[in-house]
Amino acid sequence: MAPPAIRWSAITVLLFSLIACPSFAIYCDEDDCYDLLGVSQSANASEIKKAYYKLSLKYHPDKNPDPESRKLFVKIANAYEILKDEATREQYDYAIAHPEEVFYNTARYYQAYYGHKTDPHAVLVGLLLVLSAFQYLNQWTRYKQAVSMVKKTPAYKNRLRALELERSGGVINKKKGQKQMDKKMEEELSKELELQIKGAEKPSMWELVAVRFLLLPYTVGKLLLWNGWWFWRYQVKKAPYAWDDACYLTRRSLRIHVDAWKNIDETAKDDLVRRRLWEKSNLEHYLAELRKESKRRR
């Protein structure tokens, strides 16, 4: 596969060459592919093949040491490559019949001679890397914006002042060096606050599309094993749910995010788990209680 720089250079040359020559000339330069092989446009595949072999015996570098014959042989070989394939020959014939469709003919030529040489694995890897780069940039931008907003809130400023008072023993220093000290303490406090920003966490390499794609076989295998274990323990053996599994079922039934679940009081968690909300009737009864309580407060 040609390097991107070479391929783009080829495209540039092709576009500039369109100004000076018809679009079908991109196939065999200023020559006619049929004329190079000495056949008519109506020649069949067998005639084209015979003409090529005949000319090869005459102009092949191993048969003819003349430098000019070498150049001619390259042209003949190129013409044969174009005409021996039905698809490229059809494109060439169309370009001859429709020279005014410059960009269309050029695009078909480039697709035929460069597109099929592109390794699909390389394309996939490139796509994953580009998507991952955009994903990382987007997450980092969101994160920095969230941090900037947090630092402007009164809660952040109050915690910064509390930290200043704590470290100074309740006395705020008014000396010139205080600004520098404030900056240091702000940086230290920001490290604590940044971890508490929900919905705009620091970008993680493990969350990138490329990494997840590479780990897909492992993830799928782990998921299958987990589901198999779950089915065997709770469906076949009818064992009681372990605490973590009961929490998972409860959280899934209530559609609570894992981070939000961690922030729930342990007593409240225990109450929710004991209600067995993964059972439809219990969940409906619980939701009815919540609606009733909400109306009462209104």
Image (cartoon, rainbow, N blue to C red):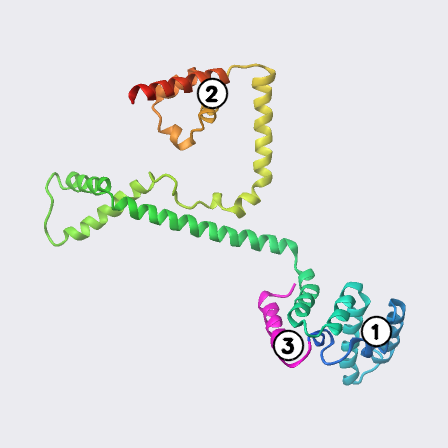
Residue carrying label 1? 41
**Mark 1: amino acid:** Gln
- SS under mark 3: helix
- Residue 236 in percent (x, y) is at 61, 16
Residue 13 among those drawn in magenta: yes
- Residue 187 in percent (x, y) is at 26, 47
**Mark 2: amino acid:** Ala
Q: Residues within 10 Å of mark 2 (few under 14, many from 20)?
A: some
Residue carrying label 2? 246
How far apart are the alpha carbons under marks 1 and 3?
23 Å
Front of the two marks 3 and 2: 3
Q: Quadrant of the C terminus?
A: top left
- Residue 262 in percent (x, y) is at 38, 29
Q: Main secondary structure of the magenta part?
A: helix
Rendered view: 150 above or below 222: below
- Residue 239 in percent (x, y) is at 54, 14
* 248 or 190, nearer to the observer: 248
**Chain-order first, disc 3 or disc 2:** 3
Residue carrying label 3? 18
> Which quadrant would residue 164 be assigned to in this image?
top left
**Chain-order first, disc 1 or disc 3:** 3
Q: Which residues are magenta?
A: 1-22
